[in-house]
Amino acid sequence: MAPWHLRDLQEDDLDQIVRLLEESRETAAEPVVTLTEAVGAIRDGMPAVVAAVGTRLVGTAVSLAAGDRAWVLRLAIDPEWRYHGIGSGLLSVLEERLAHRGVRRIGALLPAHETGEAAFLNSGYASRPDTIYFEKVLPLARAEAIILDQVGGAVPETGLWDRIAGMDAEKTLIERRLVMPLEHRDVAEHYSLEPPRAVVLFGPPGTGKTTFARAVASRLRWPFVEVFPYQLATDPHGVAGALRQLFARVDHLEQVVLFFDEAEEIASERRDPTSLAHRITNELLKLIPVFRRGDRRLLICATNAVRSLDPAFLRPGRFDYLIPIGPPDADARRAIWTRYIGPDRLAHVDLDALVRASARFTPADIEYAARTAAQTAFERHLATAERGQAAAHADAAQVTGDYLDAISSTRSSLTDEDITAFNRDLRTAARV
Ligand SMILES: Nc1ncnc2c1ncn2[C@@H]1O[C@H](COP(=O)(O)OP(=O)(O)OP(=O)(O)O)[C@@H](O)[C@H]1O
Ligand SMILES: [Mg+2]
């Protein structure tokens, strides 16, 4: 009996399949069908079979079928298992599956002398030396523009990074762990430092997770694609189908930051197995390994509740770093106030007082309070001008007073529990 057996491909074979397709090529010629295209066909449910020795996969054949026509997209055999008849075996099972779907004619395109040539000839396939293979790759800019449009992505404006005020610890960490290795890939490679492919940003609401994610894309000059869980829920292809389509599209982009906000909505540990979130998580768990195989792409998931995420979702093979984005300390609040007060009025403000009064504030709260104070001052200015008085510049006490009033009428979004929980997450969840 042969030590190997043949069977249909199962969902959790994908990791091994990708390895086989990548590593079992014999010639230097590029395969006509790319890895991504083959994985795409598998994900679309096209017939595919594998040869297994125990739990190890040693061969695979992947097809694409439409009507009575099919193509063997890729045939791969583990180099250690050549000359065991695996190639012919795979083709014969695959043909059976295809015949069952009504296929009558099967083709394959193979670089000359590539593994599998013998299997095709032995299985009754005729080679067609009279045929020329034509290929056209659409100009990247055009294809990219179409895809970006489909997925609603764009390269963010420049300078977002510099507009993040304060938050020095977070900025330094994100710059070192994410931006620098992605920007200087060659240097990173020299030190065998794998640039990150996927990270989680966690922290209380309004601390700047989305802001940081966009700013990273802005620094890298990469397109930023944001995924909203509720949009997936309403997609006619179903959640899993929508996610697969999204990842397949993004895969065609030269480079991309793919951003999932509110990851706890989709990857919560206490989720009901029949729920939408559960289906999204399961699909993501399958898609992340394939996403990770590409260079020049970064998946960023943001969450307020890292403690409620499924530990399987977070394990190191999936996410390289779990980076905390905490509430701003006094220095950070000072920088954020400075940024929102603006240079004209800064000299008239008692910054220390504002920093003290806004102890529980997130950047979002400060932004809001600063806008409220600006609105008050603006209205007063116009009202004064209307009464025919010279719009005298407010004195320091009044300007500071406007800001302090705005602070007391702004509800801080951070509760004691938020801060306690975040401090606990810092100790138990952070991976930097
Ligand atoms: N360091 C910062 N300097 C200036 N503004 C900031 C900073 N961080 C955040 N902001 C502003 O605060 C607001 C909230 O930030 P952001 O949406 O990034 O927070 P978040 O952590 O993603 O919040 P959520 O958890 O609610 O999604 C934004 O308007 C952003 O411009
Ligand atoms: Mg956000």
Image: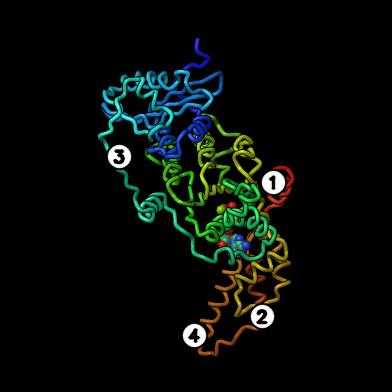
Helix or strand or loop: what does disc 2 sit on?
Answer: loop
In the picture of the structure, the residue carrying the numbered disc 4 is: 386
- Residue 105 picture quarter: top left
CB under 8 Å between discs 3 and 1:
no
Q: Residues within 10 Å of mark 3 (few under 14, many from 20)?
A: few
Q: Is residue 204 above or below residue 393?
A: above
How far is disc 3 from disc 1 in space, using C-alphas?
A: 52 Å
Q: Please tell me whether mark 4 or mark 1 is closer to you in this view.
A: 1
Counting residues from the N terminus, which is met first, the one under dot 2 or under dot 4? 2
For label 3, the residue is 133
Ligand 1 placement by image quarter = bottom right
Q: Earlier in the sequence, mark 4 or mark 3?
A: 3
In the image, what residue occupies the spot 39% across and 19% down?
93
| Residue 362 x/y as whole percent | 64, 59
Question: Which amino acid type is marked by label 3?
Answer: Tyr
Comparing labels 2 and 1, the label whose residue is closer to the camera: 1
Q: Is residue 48 above or below residue 157?
A: above
Q: Which quadrant of the view contains residue 183?
A: bottom right
Of 424 and 212, nearer the camera is: 212
**Could you say which is closer to the camera, residue 19 or residue 197?**
19
Near mark 1 (Cα within 10 A), the count class, few <14, some 14-19 or many ≥20, is: some
- According to the image, label 2 marks what residue? 347
Identity, as a three-letter code, of the amino acid under mark 1: Ala
SS assignment at label 4: helix
Q: Which mark is residue 430?
A: 1
Disc 4 from disc 3: Cα separation: 78 Å
- Ligand 1 within 8 Å, label 1 CB: no
Amino acid beneath label 4: Glu
Q: Residues within 10 Å of mark 4 (few under 14, many from 20)?
A: few
